[in-house]
């Protein structure tokens, strides 16, 4: 107490006792806030929201600066946390499977740029209600895009109906490596067949691209899956032979809805 009395004498305009009491109160409140933030982190993780810790990490780069102590900080923090919730719900809803590549890219870009609404009952209902109603249209558009990339006559701007097989250009290069863009196109084709066959889209980590690259690393020049077999050649072309004619017929029927005069392949 003598030391405090001496300090009071040295700084007469300030109550040291009061400062120490206030500091202790701040310490107590920070401890309570830390416990509340840990509880919020647990709940956020269970709800597939973003990480609470990321809001306070100097290594985390957000589209805008955030100060959780500002009046607008809470809204900004919740907006950042909502992004992963939209991603999770999209993946779980199954709607992403029905999206063509363009629609997927648009969705991913909006999430990356933070261009999404608050995650509320109203916005979720509106967003996924619209997506659900447009599933068939999205899927048919994806089918057309698959034809456009794999089976299209650009001179007449008409697609070719699928026959027993198609030829994919630039599937492999002169060193025997596979072209990533061509692999993406084959992944899209496989996804369409999965949907028509009533199966879920396979995990991309073990999809066609991964399996074909493994085959290529093993010096193989062919791959066979449930819907088609592929053989690639040194000149770069790949021959895709379809194994499920009834699914090919259904794809051609979807094509005929938009292009009744589609050309016969080959």
Image (cartoon, helix red, strand yellow):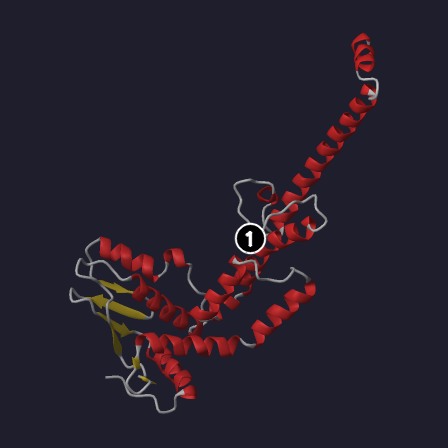
User: Does residue 122 sit above or below 135 in this rendering?
Assistant: above
User: Does residue 113 sit above or below 230 in this rendering?
Assistant: above
Residue 180 is left or right of residue 127, and the answer is left
On the image, which quarter does residue 12 sit in? top right
On the image, which quarter does residue 86 sit in? bottom right
| Count of numbered labels shown in the rendering | 1
Image coordinates of residue 48 in percent, x first then y, are 59, 52
- Quadrant for the C terminus, please: bottom left
- Extreme residue toward the bottom, this view: 261
- Residue at the disc numbered 1: 63
Image coordinates of residue 68 in percent, x first then y, are 67, 45
Q: Residues within 10 Å of mark 1 (few under 14, many from 20)?
A: few
Residue 261 is left or right of residue 99, and the answer is left
What residue lies at 33% left-to-right and 74% top-to-bottom? 149
What residue lies at 31% left-to-right and 61% top-to-bottom? 180
Q: In the depicted view, which residue is nearer to us: 246 or 127?
A: 127
Residue 141 is left or right of residue 70, and the answer is left
Image coordinates of residue 172 in percent, x first then y, are 22, 63
Image coordinates of residue 245 in percent, x first then y, are 32, 79
What residue lies at 82% left-to-right and 15% top-to-bottom? 8
- Extreme residue toward the top, this view: 2
Element at label 1:
loop
Q: In the depicted view, which residue is nearer to us: 78 or 23?
A: 23
Q: In the depicted view, which residue is nearer to us: 222 or 150?
A: 150
- Quadrant for the N terminus, please: top right
């Amino acid at each position: 107490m003598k030391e405090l009395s001496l300090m009071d004498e040295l700084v007469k305009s300030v109550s040291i006792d009061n400062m120490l009491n206030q500091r202790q109160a701040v310490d107590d409140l920070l401890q309570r806030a830390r416990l509340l933030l840990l509880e919020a982190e647990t709940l956020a993780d269970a709800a597939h929201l973003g990480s609470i810790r990321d809001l306070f990490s100097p290594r985390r780069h957000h589209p805008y600066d955030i100060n959780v102590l500002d009046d607008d900080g809470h809204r900004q923090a919740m907006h950042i946390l909502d992004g992963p919730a939209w991603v999770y719900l999209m993946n779980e809803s199954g709607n992403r499977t029905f999206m063509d590549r363009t629609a997927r890219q648009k969705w991913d870009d909006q999430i990356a740029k933070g261009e999404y609404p608050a995650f509320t009952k109203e916005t979720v209902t509106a967003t996924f209600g619209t997506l659900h109603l447009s599933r068939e249209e999205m899927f048919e558009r994806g089918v057309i895009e698959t034809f456009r990339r794999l089976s299209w006559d650009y001179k007449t701007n008409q697609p070719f109906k699928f026959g027993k097989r198609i030829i994919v250009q630039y599937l492999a290069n002169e060193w025997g490596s596979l072209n990533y863009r061509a692999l993406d196109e084959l992944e899209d084709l496989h996804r369409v067949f999965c949907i028509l066959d009533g199966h879920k889209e396979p995990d991309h980590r073990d999809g066609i691209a991964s399996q074909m690259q493994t085959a290529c690393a093993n010096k193989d020049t062919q791959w066979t899956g449930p819907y088609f077999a592929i053989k690639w050649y040194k000149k770069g072309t790949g021959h895709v032979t379809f194994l499920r004619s009834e699914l090919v017929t259904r794809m051609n029927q979807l094509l005929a809805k938009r292009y009744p005069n589609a050309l016969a392949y080959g």
